């Protein structure tokens, strides 16, 4: 970890090397430690220290980007030269107007010393607790326990200078018998709030409960989706349709539907990088402060997220603080999604289900049709049949092929408790959901 | 370079390591993307650093840093040993690497034209020309074309005495045309989808694939798909084109033969494998008699081609499926020993499939070039021989369960086959199946004239995440009794 003052010195040096009309420097770095285990033992245990300096040079409406991870003056000069060289090869991009002007960004203390100081021995002890629990039950545990410090400094020649440092601790385990598996996971900024034994206990119970699964025919079933499965669906919406570029290019399910109902009235989805219930990031990769953006409000499509570039393409729009690192042809995306809770407990969802399927999580989901929001994937790590309000037996896993928006139009109940699920980048804070007529289109052999 | 590797290896031994290897890697990446006539991305990225992997107290540790300085080498080496000793807290038995691998050598990707010497102007002009062709078709909303060039220089040294230097060069290219109408979006990609086709080769690879000459056809097909009928549902005969078959091989053969995931080390993330160890030995039927699959790291231009893997084992070619029977895994030094404990006749040495995504990642078992060997048919004859079926072209979506059995793929384009001729175009084509049943129904494979080593530059595995670049040689092939048209 380099710290705010040292990163400021580096960004000032880089800005000083540049002869471009405008220059942006993004430094991302940190220390990441990950202890990986399988068959009740640690089999990979790694540590990484890295920092990337990304420079965007702007001449008029031409831009070039270069990056490197060598912090010597010579190497930093080379990165700046490379960015300027490629910028000169560009044609004017008429949609680009300027790098962002400085705006006051909220400083949020997301650095937890206990997480930053977590040692290999501490992680090994957490893993050992899970492996012991697994072994005592005749099971095999696999998973990963990671702790990391991430820092980011964004500066530009217009005066932007934003720094953030945060910590993340993640623990995931899948515990298996010969014919079953169970899943447990926890994510937090503070490693001391994670309870490896509790995470392991959830996975062990599920692995034992799902032994000797049987098949039932695929088809349309009422489902109770645990939070990880709901987060998977939300993540897919975020990547395919909640960004301004997808909307502008007609690739989004939101295109032409703003102000119209797209889900049931009990569905409200927003993005908020400042909410401490998620993984906080107060500004984006251009240094623009993150705004809370309403995406779907009581079932009505409300809006999408913007970066400076996409905001410049529409009259009256401003960046909402959702850019990805330049150069980015994908457009802005929400990285801190939230879904409003309901009022039910999972026990009430279960008790109210005459016949249905309980889904712990999905595996290998992929978008089949982005405008129809059709997603396919498998269930895994605990799939159960519900009959007359109780779980009656474990099931072999299903393939689903289902429109997410249609599923969210048939969400009968949402849980009052939400859970933070670690996303591909950032976090997703969601309730569990009970949904009718969820389309299972195939089965597998386990 | 040798000063730093010697320093790390010597210190690792002093700190208590019984084995250590160190990799120093520098990767340069040049990426150019043109979107709707504008150069949206022109980036030169580089990353360098070192990673040291050790065995201490019989367990693994790995640490890495971007700072190539003696003091940092010392800190990181000591940390790697500390981590290994922490790993030993849960140890069941000592890591066994088997026979020593001692190799001193070098390898460089053979290239005709070093892509980093080609002027940026030439590259940008090529993409702008392709972009113009694709957008000349009325109805194309977005055209995106791209070039990628990678140069990776890496040095490997081990306490067993290996010292290996390699330079791997990759070139990639692609164009995708997107057409949008009310509630419908269709796209066509060339030469392959999801960004690009890529190989270990120089700029001659880009020239060979003629992006400009195929761009307009991509636009025309994308627009035509908007008004094409939905692919019907049913059980039918299906012919897959080379790129789609390459991904089918990747997902349903390449991943399940990774011996680390067979032994459960990917269980919590990517999953395990249906090809469990008791199926090893040539008695498990994976596919029909004509299905022959190999793993190799030596095919010219293959994206999985190199001189030595990232634990210093020389590149090799291995049978995976022979005449339909499963005969081999992708192995590492450690997993080869684990397999031998179950099957004493299994090879004692790794077949060289350990690959790391840069200096800051530990090597794990990855695909090299996993290829379906060619058959005897021409594509014209194969279509003419098919009374009723569907021809599916270029991947659009993919998903497979965590043991690699139940899969579902979607393709960008499909055609009805009726009485031996291509007929109606279909949109949103999908198919699904169970791996051994599907390959068991393969009854015809096109010949070597149709065989291409397709590049897959986006294979994800491992924690922390690693992206591998893999190759898949395929020619179009026919499958009977396939469930198609899964999406409503």
Image (spheres, rainbow, N blue to C red):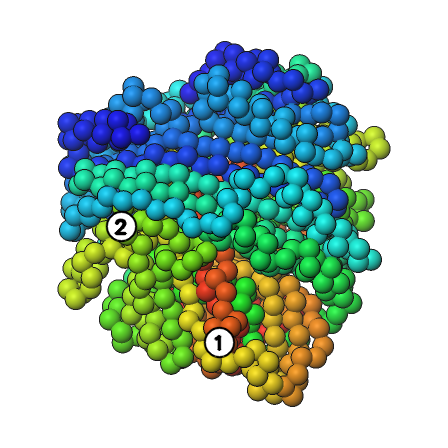
Q: Nearer the viewer, residue A435 or A157?
A: A157
**Would you identify the image quadrant in which residue A149 lies?**
top left
The disc, 2 or 1, on the residue closer to the chain's N-terminal end is: 2
User: Which chain is home to disc 1?
Assistant: B
Instruction: Give residue B345's quadrant in the image.
Output: bottom left
Marking on residue B313: 2
> Are dots 2 and 1 in contact, CB under 8 Å?
no
Q: Residue furthest right?
A: A315
**Dot 1: few (<14), some (14–19), or many (≥20) neighbours within 10 Å?**
some
Report the residue marked by disc 1: B447
Query: Which quadrant: the N terminus of chain B?
Result: top left
Secondary structure of residue under mark 2: loop
In the image, residue A245 above or below residue B475 = above
Q: Is residue A337 left or right of residue B433?
A: right
Residue shown at the point (42%, 45%) measured from the top left: B168
In front of the other: A227 or A127: A127
């Amino acid at each position: 970890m380099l710290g705010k003052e040292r990163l400021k010195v580096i960004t000032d040096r880089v800005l000083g090397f540049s002869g471009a009309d405008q220059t942006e420097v993004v430094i991302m770095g940190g220390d990441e430690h990950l202890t990986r285990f399988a068959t009740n033992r640690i089999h990979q245990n790694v540590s990484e220290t890295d920092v990337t300096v990304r420079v965007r040079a702007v001449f008029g409406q031409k831009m070039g980007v270069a990056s490197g991870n060598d912090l010597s003056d010579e190497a930093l000069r080379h990165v700046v030269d490379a960015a300027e060289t490629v910028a000169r090869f560009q044609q004017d991009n008429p949609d680009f107007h300027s790098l962002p002007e400085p705006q006051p960004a909220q400083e949020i203390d997301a650095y937890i010393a206990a997480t930053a100081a977590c040692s290999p021995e501490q992680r090994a002890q957490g893993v050992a607790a899970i492996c012991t629990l697994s072994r005592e039950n005749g099971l095999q545990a696999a998973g990963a326990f990671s702790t990391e410090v991430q820092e980011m400094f964004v500066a530009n020649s217009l005066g932007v200078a934003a720094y953030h440092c945060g910590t993340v601790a993640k623990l995931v385990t899948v515990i298996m018998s010969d014919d079953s598996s169970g899943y447990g996971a926890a994510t937090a900024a503070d490693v001391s709030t994670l309870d490896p034994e509790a995470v392991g206990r959830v996975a062990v119970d599920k692995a034992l409960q799902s032994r000797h699964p049987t098949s039932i025919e695929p088809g349309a079933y009422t489902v109770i989706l645990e939070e990880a499965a709901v987060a998977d669906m939300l993540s897919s919406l975020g990547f395919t349709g909640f960004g301004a570029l997808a909307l502008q290019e007609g690739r989004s399910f939101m295109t032409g539907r703003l102000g119209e109902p797209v889900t049931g009235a009990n569905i409200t989805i927003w993005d908020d990088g400042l909410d401490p219930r998620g993984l906080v990031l107060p500004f984006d990769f251009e240094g623009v402060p993150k705004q809370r953006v309403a995406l779907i409000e009581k079932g009505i499509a409300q809006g999408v997220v913007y970066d400076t570039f996409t905001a410049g393409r529409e009259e009256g729009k401003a960046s909402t603080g959702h850019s990805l690192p330049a150069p980015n042809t994908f457009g802005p995306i929400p990285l801190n999604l939230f879904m409003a809770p309901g009022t039910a407990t999972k026990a009430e969802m279960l008790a109210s289900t005459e016949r249905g399927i309980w889904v712990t999580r999905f595996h290998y989901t992929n978008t089949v049709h982005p405008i129809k929001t059709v997603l396919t994937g498998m269930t895994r790590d605990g799939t159960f049949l519900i009959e007359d309000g109780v779980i009656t037996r474990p099931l072999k896993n299903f393939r689903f092929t289902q429109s997410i928006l249609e599923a969210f139009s048939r969400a009968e109940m949402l849980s009052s408790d939400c859970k933070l699920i670690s996303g591909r980048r950032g976090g997703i804070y969601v309730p569990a959901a009970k949904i009718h007529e969820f389309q299972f289109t195939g089965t597998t052999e386990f | 370079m040798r000063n730093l590797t010697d320093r790390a290896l010597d210190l690792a031994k002093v700190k208590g390591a019984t084995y250590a290897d160190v990799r120093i890697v520098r990767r340069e990446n040049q990426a150019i993307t043109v979107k709707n006539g504008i150069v949206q991305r022109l980036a030169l990225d580089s990353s360098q650093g070192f990673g040291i992997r050790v065995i201490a107290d019989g367990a693994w540790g790995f640490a890495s840093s971007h700072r190539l300085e003696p003091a940092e080498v010392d800190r990181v080496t000591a940390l790697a040993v500390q981590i290994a000793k922490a790993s030993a807290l849960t140890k069941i038995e000592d890591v066994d690497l088997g026979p020593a691998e001692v190799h001193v050598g070098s390898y460089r990707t053979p290239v005709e034209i070093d892509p980093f010497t080609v002027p940026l102007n030439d590259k940008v002009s090529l993409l702008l020309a392709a972009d113009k062709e694709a957008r000349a078709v009325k109805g194309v909303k977005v055209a995106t074309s791209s070039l990628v060039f990678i140069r990776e220089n890496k040095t490997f040294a081990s306490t067993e005495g290996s010292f290996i230097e390699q330079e791997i060069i990759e070139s990639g290219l692609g164009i995708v045309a997107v057409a949008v109408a009310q509630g419908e979006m269709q796209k066509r990609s060339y030469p392959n989808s999801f960004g690009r086709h890529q190989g270990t080769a120089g700029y001659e690879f880009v020239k060979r694939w003629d992006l400009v000459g195929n761009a307009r056809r991509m636009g025309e097909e994308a627009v035509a798909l908007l008004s094409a009928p939905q692919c019907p549902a049913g059980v039918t005969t299906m012919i897959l084109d080379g790129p789609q078959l390459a991904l089918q091989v990747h997902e349903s053969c390449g991943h399940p033969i990774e011996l680390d995931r067979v032994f459960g080390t990917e269980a919590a993330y990517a999953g395990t494998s249906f090809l469990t160890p008791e199926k090893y030995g040539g008695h498990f039927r994976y596919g029909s008699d004509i299905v022959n699959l190999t793993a190799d790291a030596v095919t010219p231009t293959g994206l999985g081609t190199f001189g030595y893997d990232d634990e210093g084992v020389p590149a090799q070619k291995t049978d995976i499926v022979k005449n339909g029977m499963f005969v081999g895994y992708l192995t590492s030094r450690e997993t080869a020993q684990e397999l031998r404990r179950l099957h004493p006749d299994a090879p004692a040495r790794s077949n060289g499939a350990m690959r790391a995504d840069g200096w800051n990642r530990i090597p794990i078992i990855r695909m090299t070039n996993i290829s379906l060997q060619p058959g005897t048919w021409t594509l014209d004859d194969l279509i003419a021989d098919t009374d009723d079926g569907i021809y599916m072209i270029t991947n659009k979506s993919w998903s497979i369960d965590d043991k690699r059995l139940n899969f579902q793929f979607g393709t960008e384009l499909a055609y009805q086959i009726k009485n031996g001729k291509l007929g109606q175009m279909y949109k949103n084509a999908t198919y699904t199946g169970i791996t051994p049943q599907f390959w068991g129904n393969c009854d015809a494979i096109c010949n070597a004239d149709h065989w291409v080593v397709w590049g897959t530059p986006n294979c994800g595995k491992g924690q922390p995440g690693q992206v591998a670049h893999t190759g898949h040689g395929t020619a179009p092939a026919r499958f009977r009794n396939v469930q198609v048209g899964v999406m409503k």
